[in-house]
Image: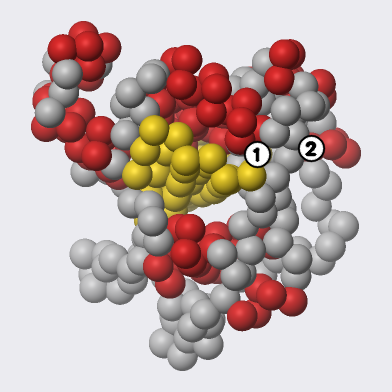
Amino acid sequence: MLTPDEIQRYKRHLVLKEVGGQGQQRLKAARVLVIGAGGLGSPVLLYLAAAGVGTIGVIDDDTVSLSNLQRQIVHDTASIGVAKVVSATENLKRINPHVKIEAMAGRLTADNALDIISRYDIVSDGSDNFATRYLVSDACALAKKTLVFAAVGPFDGHLTTLKPHLKTPEGTPFPTYRCLFAEAPPPGTVANCSQVGVLGATVGVIGTLAAVEIIKELLGIGESLAGRLLIYDGLGARFETVNFAWDRDNPLTGTHATITDLSAHRAAPGVAP
């Protein structure tokens, strides 16, 4: 049940017919894991906490640096040098003391990913490297957990929802990250934001959209982004949606799947988002 304070806090949700009291209680009972307390993770964490998602897990092994603050808005100047999961927890509790934060200072690895992910209803991945993205996607598919994935470039970004444990109306599985990107590009061919830069507000746009999709999935409202890639062009002020489908030859959920555990990921070290 919602307390009188929660009723007042969430009153703009409660008057939404798509949310209402039952929906808000569903959010309160939900458990969401956020991979990374950085640029994309920041707006996700802030909006999930403000929305009243009852339990939010956050995993990151980094500390706050001055150069983070241009886009990682869950942190502030006083948090420089502090572990990001600690800084995020403190700020999220100030926003909403009703929310429980499960902070994990460390790396997501092949050895702990399934155990951690299995504790949550839905996962948000805002990591900035391909090793983590494939690890998270594979782990979510094996654990049968919905994944909202986002990524950004200097002035652009893209977003999708992955739930291959469920079927499309046509009876095929929803696609996975491997259906969208069959394999990672060769090392060094895709520059990261420390090399090419990124407009902080662009990260905010994509992270906020990710929060919307997570809340939609938790409430079962609207049209899912499963099987659709939302692309944002900040300089052109344009959105585009591209459909993509299950690849029957993908090694994770294809007709002759070869990925049945995370052992292949042990060849690469766990990486912090």
Residue bearing the label numbered 1: 152
Residue sitting at 17 percent across and 18 percent down? 3
Q: Is residue 218 visible?
A: yes
Residue sitting at 64 percent across and 44 percent down? 105
Q: In the image, which disc is placed on residue 23?
A: none
The answer to whether 8 is drawn above or below residue 130 in the figure is above
Between 219 and 268, the one lying in front of the other is: 268
Residue sitting at 75 percent across and 70 percent down? 268
Find numbered disc 1 in the image and state the secondary structure of the residue it sits on.
strand
Side of 197 relative to 10 (left or right): right
Q: Position of residue 104 (x, y in %)?
A: 57, 45
The answer to whether 246 is drawn above or below residue 193 in the figure is below
Q: Position of residue 250 (x, y in %)?
A: 52, 78
Residue bearing the label numbered 2: 193
Rendering quarter of residue 243: bottom left
Side of 192 relative to 20 (left or right): right
Instruction: Calculate the distance from the C-alpha at mark 1 to the C-alpha at mark 2.
Output: 9 Å
Coloring scheme of the render? secondary structure
Between 231 and 140, the one lying in front of the other is: 140
Side of 52 relative to 273 (left or right): left
The quarter of the image holding the N terminus is top left
Label 2 environment density (alpha carbons within 10 Å; few <14, some 14–19, many ≥20): few
| Furthest residue toward bottom | 256
The type of residue carrying mark 2 is Cys
Side of 163 relative to 41 (left or right): left
Sooner in the amino-acid sequence: mark 1 or mark 2? 1
The answer to whether 13 is drawn above or below residue 231 in the figure is above
Q: Position of residue 166 (x, y in %)?
A: 29, 66
